[in-house]
Each structure stands twice: as C-alpha cells, then as structure tokens.
Image (cartoon, rainbow, N blue to C red):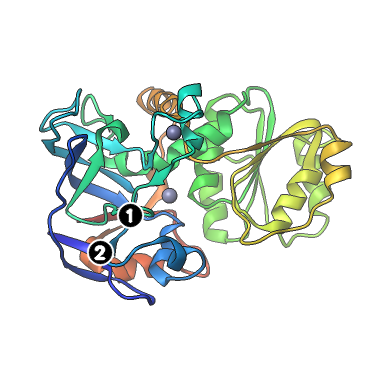
C-alpha cells in the first residue's frame, strides 16, 4: 500500500509502498477514507523539537483518521466488515489507576497512534478496536477525520458550562475556531477572539465570534474587558494558542474566580505572575489533553447530529495524499491562510 513514510532522520517524508499492516487480535484493519493534518504532525514532518526523540524510523505518521473496517481481529467485539469509524488516537491501557477511575484521557500508559506507533497517512491502518468510534450512518462521513481534533475543543470548551458566560478564545487555528462555534452553540453570552492572521480573523467571524482582536493591538486588555461588558474581565478563557504572551494575557483577562482552560502548548518553560494572576484572583486553571473517552465523543456527536455545530467550513483545503508537499506547505504558511488540511489516500 502507499503511505507517507519518514525514512530518514531529516526534514520531509516519502510517498512510497510499504507493507500492509498486520492486525493483532484486538485490532481492526481500516481502509482510510480521509485523514487530516494535526499541528503535531509538523515537527514529525520537519524532524524538529521532540520528534527525533519520540518517533522510530521508518515511520508512517498521521493520527486524525476515519475509514472503513475491512478486517476484524479475533478478539474484537462490536465491529464488523463495512463499519465506518472515526479513530480516537489516544490508545489507553484500560487497566491503570486513571483508566479505572474514568480518566482514560490521562492514562498512565498512554500511547498515541501515529506518534508513538505507526499511524494512518496511508491506505490502510491497524487500529485497536477500543479506539474505534462507529458511525451509525454516513451523515458525518465527510468530517469524520476531524472528529479527533474537534473532540479536543469539545472537552476544552465544555469542561464546565459556558451558558450565559463571556468566553475569550485565544488563537483561531482550527482548535480556536471549533471552540468559538461550540461556545456559541452552547449558549455563551459573548465570544471574544484573539488572532493575528487576517484570514483566520475572518474565519473566526464566520464561526460566530462577537469581537476579534489582534495580539498586536494597543490597550488590548482594556479592549477585551470592555468587549466583555464587565470591567473585572471575562468569565472563561480558552487558551488554544500556546503563545506565552497569550497565556499571560488570558490570566489577566479572566475575572476573579473565573476559569482559565489551558490547551495550547508553549514550546518551553515560561514565566507568569503566579501570585497575582492565579492565587489572589482565585481563578480555576484546568489543563486539557486529548478527549474524555468517550464522554467528549458522545457530546460531540450530539452537537453535530443536531446541527448545533457544523465544522465543515473549517476544512479549507483537501489534497490527494501524493500531493503531501503542497499540503504541508499550506499548513506551514507563515500567514496561516488555512483551517484544517485534509489528505485523501
Ligand atoms: Zn493531533
Ligand atoms: Zn490506562
């Protein structure tokens, strides 16, 4: 089968023939319908940051996947040939303290498909059956690969309720755009967005943001508080950018006893005014990683099927997998003129 394979310890990948994966007894063989590129695929592609330490070579990456089950391992239950699935990329063990305490998203033995094990930028992939999310019909088929990242935003946005609240979304990449739409759908009073790229500012507006500011604006904090309608700040900050300045700004923008949800990843250690911005303000800081398995998926499916959210416009580019160089160049565009980028094997 054809796959995007990293064969050398350097930038770039090859689109080449590799062996069809052999499934284990608890796995499904899935014929990939669509896959999408995650921000975390970029260090793998460029072989920078954590990637050289983490990924084995040769390596097929890609973890936002959907497709049709074409073979089932003998110990799998609940799946049959022809089922269409999305994939939970976080392979939880099911046995550790967290897994047995309804906290599978922070499993102590977590393995991520396509980062720690062979992934799905390929025609077929072996998927542990416990990571399959079965679709009952074809209604969500065209967006099925982006349910994995959408689930992150569902978890981050709705970890506590947003109804009637002012929400400040920092960073309008796909995660921020998803979060804007989810917050609006779930009754947020006002959604304020932070984004520097004009292309993504426009997308934020389309997803329903009530006010959009650029990180380079003067008197930014004052403007955000004014837009929220409360001089003490916003009720909820969703930090989706990982930029240290945005993290610090968000901690200043949230009102005393408000909620700061941390999802974006700064590239290194950073400083912040811990005493004044967290302790004395009495705010709640909540880290978000992955999706609640499978609570986030159920909530997401309900929001999608009811039509409360429609993330399809956030898919701005679709390429055939053989055109992967164009796809990755689009993802790495310095002006960030893209939303989600999808690859078709
Ligand atoms: Zn990802
Ligand atoms: Zn576990």
- On-image quarter of the C terminus: bottom left
Tell me: residue 333, above or below residue 165.
below
- On-image quarter of the N terminus: bottom left
Give the secondary structure at mark 1. Answer: loop
Q: Which residue is mark 1?
A: 62
Instruction: From the viewer's perspective, tell me whether residue 298 is left or right of residue 65.
Output: right
Residue pushed farthest front?
96
Q: Earlier in the sequence, mark 1 or mark 2?
A: 2
In whole angstroms, how far apart are the C-alphas of marks 1 and 2? Answer: 9 Å
Q: Residue at x 45, y 57 (%)?
A: 40
Q: Residues within 10 Å of mark 1 (few under 14, many from 20)?
A: many
- Image location of residue 15, percent across then percent down: 21, 69
Quick check: can you spot residue 331?
no
Quarter occupied by residue 65 = top left
Give the tally of numbered discs: 2
Quarter occupied by residue 187 = top right
Q: Which residue is mark 2?
A: 4
Tell me: residue 242, above or below residue 231.
below
Instruction: From the viewer's perspective, tell me whether residue 36 is left or right of residue 152.
Output: left
- Image location of residue 74, percent across then percent down: 13, 31
Seen from the viewer's position, the closer of residues 178 and 266 is 266
Give the secondary structure at mark 2. Answer: strand
- Image location of residue 301, percent across then percent down: 37, 26
Q: Residue at x 15, y 62 (%)?
A: 2
Tell me: residue 182, above or below residue 43.
above
Q: Residues within 10 Å of mark 2 (few under 14, many from 20)?
A: many
- Image location of residue 213, percent across then percent down: 69, 52
Q: Are marks 1 and 2 in contact (CB under 8 Å)?
A: yes
Quick check: can you spot residue 205?
yes
Q: Residue at x 29, y 66 (%)?
A: 324
């Amino acid at each position: 089968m054809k796959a995007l394979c990293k064969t050398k310890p350097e930038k770039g990948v090859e689109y080449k023939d590799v062996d069809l994966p052999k499934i284990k007894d608890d796995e499904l063989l899935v014929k990939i319908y669509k896959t999408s590129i995650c921000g975390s695929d970029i260090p793998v592609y460029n072989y920078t940051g954590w990637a050289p330490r983490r990924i084995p070579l040769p390596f097929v990456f890609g973890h936002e996947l959907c497709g049709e089950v074409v073979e089932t391992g003998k110990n799998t239950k609940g799946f049959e040939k022809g089922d269409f699935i999305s994939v939970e990329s976080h392979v939880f063990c099911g046995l550790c303290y967290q897994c047995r305490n309804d906290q599978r998203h922070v499993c102590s033995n977590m393995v991520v498909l396509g980062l720690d094990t062979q992934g799905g930028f390929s025609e077929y992939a072996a998927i542990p059956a416990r990571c399959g999310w079965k679709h009952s019909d074809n209604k969500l088929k065209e967006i099925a690969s982006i349910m994995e990242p959408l689930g992150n935003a569902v978890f981050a946005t709705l970890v506590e309720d947003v109804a009637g609240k002012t929400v400040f979304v920092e960073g309008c990449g796909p995660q921020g755009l998803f979060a804007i739409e989810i917050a609006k759908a779930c009754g947020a009073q006002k959604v304020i967005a932070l984004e520097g790229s004009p292309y993504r500012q426009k997308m934020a507006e389309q997803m329903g943001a009530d006010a959009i500011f650029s990180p380079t604006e003067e008197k930014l904090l004052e403007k955000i508080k004014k837009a929220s309608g409360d001089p003490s700040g916003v009720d909820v900050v969703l930090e989706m950018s990982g930029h240290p300045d945005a993290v610090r700004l968000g901690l200043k923008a949230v009102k005393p006893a408000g909620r700061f949800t941390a999802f974006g990843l700064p590239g290194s250690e950073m400083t912040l005014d811990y005493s004044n911005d967290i302790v004395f303000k009495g705010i709640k800081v909540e880290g978000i990683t992955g999706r609640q398995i499978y609570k986030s998926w159920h909530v997401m499916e309900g929001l999608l099927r009811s039509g409360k959210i429609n993330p399809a416009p956030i898919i701005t580019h679709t390429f055939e997998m053989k055109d992967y160089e164009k796809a990755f160049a689009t993802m790495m565009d310095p002006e960030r003129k893209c939303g989600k980028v999808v690859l078709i094997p």
